[in-house]
Image (spheres, rainbow, N blue to C red):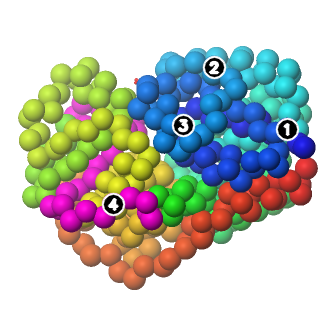
Amino acid sequence: MKKILAIIGARPQFIKHAPIELAMKDKAQLVTIHTGQHYDERMSQIFFDELKMTPPKYQLNVGSATHGVQTGKMMAEIDKILLDEKPDAVLVYGDTNSTLAGALCASKLHIPVIHIEAGLRSFNKKMPEELNRVLTDHVSNLLFAPTNHAVANLEDEGITENVYKSGDVMCDMALIAKERVKNQSSSPYILVTIHRPYNTDDKVRITEILTQLNALGTPVKFPMHPRTKNLLATFGISMEDFQNIEVLTPQSYFDTIELLANCSCLVTDSGGMQKEAYILEKQCVTIRSETEWVETLENGWNQLIFDDLSQLAPSIRKEPGQYTPNIYGDGTAAISIAQKIFTHF
Ligand code: UD1
């Protein structure tokens, strides 16, 4: 049995890891490291409990810091574990600092790197995630790209060997969750998640975003990422001044999908939620100047706004066109990824 060491650390990675863990059960020796990039109970443990995931063998507890310090602290610890565990391959997901730390440590030790969610590009190098995924792809030995577009992005950078179009593991989970959550006929609301530095770290910009959300005729539900909450406190912004916005604590996975399944529109800057909205056939407005998930833009299911935030209300009013199903797969990505890993090694 091959030993695969998976590295996770931030909220979306717990969701991506859950179906992979299931698909590898009894077929590989799966060892998991949790870097501790996300550590609040509602940003981490809640997902392990709800998705019934095995507790990680290693908890690095690195916590928050600047990118260099956070990534460096992870690497110092991961290095030691890799030397000790000697896995046959290291598995990393997505584009966070935990992804990069794992990929760099493994490749320097000549341990094959498997990247799930390879080939995504925003072409915006100011995003830390863009640097993380480009660098990770270039040191990876086995790359699972969710879409044709992602495969083409890799090809454009000269990465053509051991690249497989796999579908998307988050789609696997979303399709399961869609069947489980309740469809409620509550009064209409708009679901909002905002946590990207370019939207949260400037007082004028975050105030403008909140002002636009507050002016929407429809009530807003806003599960707030701790980074956004902390910054609002630093800026002295009180949510009492935005009565149309109901602030919620960070939600569990199934609660998020339920909120999404019952909303009239999603407004977000998250990567994963744009995709989840598409899978649930929900209209989305993304407060970013570009997206990696370009398929969602087709026929207006997702619209990008950035500089002119007054476009928020008119964008929400636009009806999307025809819907193309299964662009992120049919819910079997994790199974086919696991099979490919077993045949490859
Ligand atoms: C990270 C990822 C981002 C992903 C997001 C999902 C990188 C570069 N970014 O962004 O791609 O979309 O996770 O949520 O890896 N904080 C807490 N408690 C926590 C975690 C974070 O209070 O459990 C606060 C801290 O103030 C911290 C800030 O959030 O400094 C940012 O956390 P960090 O993990 O650095 O980046 P995210 O914004 O969460």
Q: Residue 132: horizontal and vertical position, in percent?
A: 62, 39
Question: Is residue 190 found inside the magenta-colored segment of the image?
Answer: yes
Q: Which residue is mark 2?
A: 60
Mark 3 Cα shell of 10 Å, populated few (<14), some (14-19), many (≥20): some
Question: How far apart are labels 4 and 3 at the CA level?
Answer: 21 Å
Q: Which residue is mark 4?
A: 182
In-front residue for pair 257/310: 257
Q: Secondary structure at mark 1?
A: strand
Q: Which residue is mark 1?
A: 3
Q: Residue at x 23, y 56 (%)?
A: 190
Q: Secondary structure at mark 4?
A: loop
Please identify, in this view, whether the residue under mark 1 or under mark 3 is nearer the observer.
3
Q: Residue at x 45, y 65 (%)?
A: 179
Q: Secondary structure at mark 3?
A: helix
Q: Residue 130: horizontal and vertical position, in percent?
A: 57, 44
Tags 3 and 2 touching, CB below 8 Å: no
Q: Earlier in the sequence, mark 1 or mark 2?
A: 1
**Is 39 left, or right, of 184 in this rendering?**
right
Q: Residue at x 84, y 29 (%)?
A: 108
Q: Which residue is mark 3?
A: 48
> Which amino acid does the dot numbered 2 rest on?
Leu
Residue 193 in view in this figure: yes
Q: Residue 317: horizontal and vertical position, in percent?
A: 20, 69
Tags 1 and 3 touching, CB below 8 Å: no
Q: Is mark 1 within 8 Å of ligand 1?
A: no
